[in-house]
Image: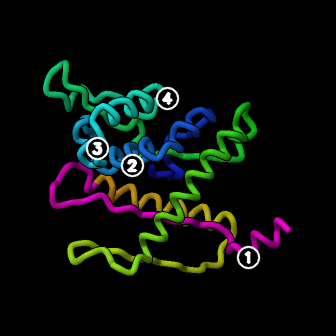
Amino acid sequence: MPYHSQGQPVHDPKILRAIAHPVRNRILTELTASGSMRAADLARELDIPANQASFHLRQLAKYGLVEEDPEAARDKRDRVWRPTSEHGLSVKMDELERLPGGKAAGAVFRQHASSWGHAVVDAAYAPEGPGPDTLRTVNESAVRLTQEEAGQLAEELDAVIAAWTKRTRGRDPERRTYLWFSVLQPYPESIAREDG
């Protein structure tokens, strides 16, 4: 699921648990990248049964993360879904963990995010490569910033990704969903020194 500073704020630890589920997270990612979709389309894209996609869409709707898109439906029985925020979500862990149930929800979310981060890095550095019809790049840069400058940089990068997402949203068969995975934080050694 895309997380951006401009995204829909998450105010409930239950929502944090809901988005920690890998299938739900992937559904939100695909809806954000592609726009409105039916459960059957998501099922094909994610290679899961259609009833499983429908179940997870209903759960996401229960938490206000997706909604039906009646304008995209062919008729009243046709259920087409869209994310409630085209910019993804904004998660502030320190605020959420102060709420009842927040620490437990945060632990579940972090465990999923950590596993996902490892999977992304492993895929990025896999020796077999992405194939001739895809592009894969890895970028690691060090920049000297104040906290305010780091916030500005994050907002500027979010704006670039949001513009590309909006420009390419849709079900064009020549496109595939690419993942932009980034972390902006103080260099890990300095974090370890501060914690120690």
Mark 1 is on which residue type?
Glu
The numbered mark at residue 35 is 3
Residue labelled with disc 1? 189
Mark 2 is on which residue type?
Thr
In space, the residues marked 3 and 2 are separated at their CA atoms by: 10 Å
- Answer yes or no: do the residues labelled 1 and 4 have beta carbons within 8 Å? no
In space, the residues marked 4 and 3 are separated at their CA atoms by: 19 Å
Check disc 1 and report its element: helix, strand or loop: helix
- The residue sitting at 66% across, 63% down in the picture is 148
- Answer yes or no: do the residues labelled 1 and 2 have beta carbons within 8 Å? no
Mark 3 is on which residue type?
Gly
Residue 102 as seen in the image, left or right of residue 121: right
- The residue sitting at 73% across, 31% down in the picture is 100
Relative to 127, say whether 87 is above or below: above
| Sequence-wise first label, 4 or 3 | 3
Residue labelled with disc 2? 29
In space, the residues marked 2 and 4 are separated at their CA atoms by: 16 Å
| Sequence-wise first label, 3 or 2 | 2
Residue labelled with disc 4? 63
Residue 152 in percent (x, y) is at 57, 63
| Sequence-wise first label, 2 or 4 | 2
Check disc 3 and report its element: helix, strand or loop: loop
Q: In the rendered structure, which segment of residues is drawn in magenta?
A: 167-196
Residue 91 in percent (x, y) is at 59, 46
Relative to 68, say whether 178 is above or below: below
Decide which of 157, 84 is in the foreground and name it. 84
| Sequence-wise first label, 1 or 2 | 2
Mark 4 is on which residue type?
Tyr
